[in-house]
């Protein structure tokens, strides 16, 4: 993928400068001046070289990307797109798990993706499956029906009782193949048109971006502060773009761990009502709740609440839940049925048995206790640095001290046998990633190995390089 020093002459093209640049891009690609795979100059570099504003270049790049002429890769730049039609997503959503990394490279500790500690889940699942084996009947030969999951939906209402969601019932519950499946179904229910727009936090869970791409939607980033998404920035984005839905993580912003205050939640709801936005409230990490009403309670007519068992019991179950806006549960269940008919009967029977026996609640408490011990280990080692965290959350956010860039810190951490995520992996817009990293609390590693890794990272943070790498 060669770089380019392409410098177009905009005087040859008509219209506003951003359109002239867009036409110049198309002409250069057509004539072979910019072949497939060519990396274009960064926005600011090209703007300076041809005497226009960065906003002009950014808008031209955006138009060309929407038209399929260019493609943007977060953290790598903007490239001339292949002329061969792409038949699916261009990158995997999920990296290999920490357990797979450990099998492949035994000396490498993967702290990129939060994974739950083993606190007896495997034994509990095995016991439940053995009991289920004696009860399997001919219903396992049929497709799942829309009413067959009623007992499990009722059980999920009880499971969610510790969350201040307002008044909900089984009719509001939609069962999905994990949280990512839930997000995709919600977008299918809410988006209309050839190029719909969704709003998301400027640093966001990458799954929002992937689900938007599958739905041919444009993602518009909205600025954050210490409380999560800024209401004034959302209002401004709504005035500039015809958005349909805003995707939020108010309880535990991923990756910064920020939590919205009640006042900020009220402001977000007011903006959503003013612009008739749907709200996707992602609460999959679900740290300890303090009674602050969820957005689903504050705006039940427009909020889709998402959670899953991946961050509380086991990711391998692929079991997620949507609490739909009041009156929209049936429509959302129909959308889910059109995607996958229904969840596999062994999964729904297992989850129902775990819920009704109390085993799910016991395992959830054991997971929280194990995460609390790992958080204490991390804070003891790294607490003198600028860290954000929440109790019950399976990752921390570390802002780099003077002398470190997140990119170079990530490389040095890998050289020391530790994989972490840099902020730019969550950035939705070029150049807006802070100088920080996210570190998972390593559920698949022993506490001793995790503690040793935290000490190695602390040593790196305490000793930045003499010269900043670029």
Image (cartoon, helix red, strand yellow):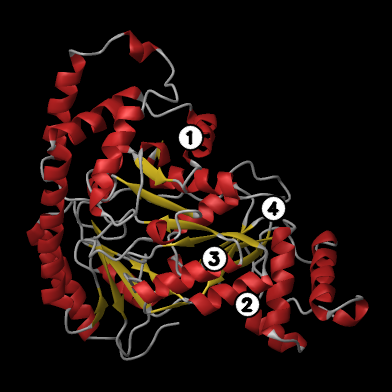
Give the image quarter of residue 15.
Answer: bottom right
Note whether 27 is above or below 230 in the view shown: above
Mark sitting earlier along the chain (1/2)? 2
Q: Residue furthest front?
A: 167
Residue placed at 36% from the left, 37% from the top?
170
Q: Is residue 5 visible?
A: no
Q: Count neighbours of disc 3 (C-alpha within 10 A) and say few if under 14, some if 14 to 19, many if 20 or more.
A: many
Mark sitting earlier along the chain (4/2)? 2
- CA gap between label 1 and label 4 equals 37 Å
Look at the numbered discs 3 and 1 and tell me whether their residues touch, using CB distance below 8 Å: no
- CA gap between label 4 and label 3 equals 38 Å
Residue placed at 45% from the left, 25% from the top?
146
Left or right: residue 336 compared with residue 403: right
Q: Count neighbours of disc 4 (C-alpha within 10 A) and say few if under 14, some if 14 to 19, many if 20 or more.
A: some
**Mark number displayed over residue 229:** none
Look at the numbered discs 1 and 2 and tell me whether their residues touch, using CB distance below 8 Å: no
Mark sitting earlier along the chain (4/3)? 4
Query: Can you say which quadrant of the picture contains the C terminus?
Result: bottom left
Closer to us: mark 2 or mark 3? 3
In the picture of the structure, the residue carrying the numbered disc 1 is 333
- CA gap between label 2 and label 3 equals 34 Å
Residue placed at 37% from the left, 81% from the top?
405
Look at the numbered discs 4 and 2 and tell me whether their residues touch, using CB distance below 8 Å: no
In the picture of the structure, the residue carrying the numbered disc 3 is 272
Look at the numbered discs 1 and 4 and tell me whether their residues touch, using CB distance below 8 Å: no
In the picture of the structure, the residue carrying the numbered disc 4 is 82
Residue 240 % position (x, y): 67, 73
Residue 62 % position (x, y): 69, 67
In the picture of the structure, the residue carrying the numbered disc 2 is 42
Mark sitting earlier along the chain (1/4)? 4
């Amino acid at each position: 993928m060669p770089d380019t020093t392409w410098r177009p002459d905009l005087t040859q093209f008509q219209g506003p400068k951003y359109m002239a640049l867009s036409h110049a891009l198309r002409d250069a690609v057509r004539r072979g001046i910019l072949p497939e795979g060519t990396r274009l100059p960064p926005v600011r570099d090209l703007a300076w070289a041809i005497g226009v504003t960065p906003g002009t270049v950014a808008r031209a790049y955006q138009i060309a990307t929407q038209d399929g002429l260019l493609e943007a890769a977060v953290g790598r730049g903007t490239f001339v797109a292949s002329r061969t039609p792409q038949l699916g997503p261009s990158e995997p959503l999920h990296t290999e798990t920490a357990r797979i990394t450990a099998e492949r490279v035994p000396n490498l500790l993967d702290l990129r993706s939060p994974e739950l500690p083993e606190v007896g889940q495997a034994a509990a699942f095995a016991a439940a499956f053995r009991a289920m084996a004696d009860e399997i009947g001919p219903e396992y030969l049929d497709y799942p029906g829309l009413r067959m999951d009623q007992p499990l939906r009722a059980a999920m209402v009880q499971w969610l009782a510790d969350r201040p969601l307002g008044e909900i019932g089984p009719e509001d519950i939609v069962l999905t193949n994990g949280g990512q499946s839930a997000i995709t179904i919600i977008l299918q229910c809410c988006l209309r048109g050839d190029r719909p727009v969704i709003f998301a936090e400027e640093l966001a869970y990458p799954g929002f971006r992937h689900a938007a791409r599958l739905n041919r939607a444009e993602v518009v980033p909205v600025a954050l502060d210490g409380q999560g998404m800024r209401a004034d920035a959302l209002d401004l984005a709504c005035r500039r773009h015809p958005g349909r839905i805003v995707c939020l993580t108010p309880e535990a912003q991923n990756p910064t761990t920020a939590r919205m205050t009640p006042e900020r939640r009220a402001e977000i709801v007011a903006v959503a009502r003013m612009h008739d936005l749907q709200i996707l409230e992602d609460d999959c990490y679900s740290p300890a709740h303090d009674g602050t009403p969820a957005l689903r309670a504050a705006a039940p007519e427009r909020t889709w609440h998402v959670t899953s068992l991946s961050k509380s019991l086991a990711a391998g179950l692929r079991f997620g839940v949507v609490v739909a806006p009041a009156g929209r549960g049936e429509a959302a269940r129909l959308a889910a049925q059109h995607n996958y008919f229904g969840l596999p009967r062994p999964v729904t029977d297992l989850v129902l048995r775990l819920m009704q026996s109390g085993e799910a609640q016991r395992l959830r408490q054991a997971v929280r206790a194990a995460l609390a011990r790992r958080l204490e280990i991390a804070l003891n080692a790294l607490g003198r640095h600028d860290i954000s965290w929440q109790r019950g959350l399976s990752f921390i956010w570390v802002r780099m001290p003077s002398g470190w860039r997140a990119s170079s810190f990530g490389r040095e951490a890998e050289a020391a046998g530790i994989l972490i995520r840099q902020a730019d992996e969550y950035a939705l817009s070029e150049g807006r990633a802070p100088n920080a990293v996210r570190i998972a609390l390593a559920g698949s590693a022993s506490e001793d190995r995790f503690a040793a890794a935290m000490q190695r990272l602390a040593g790196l943070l305490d000793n930045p390089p003499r010269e900043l790498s670029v």
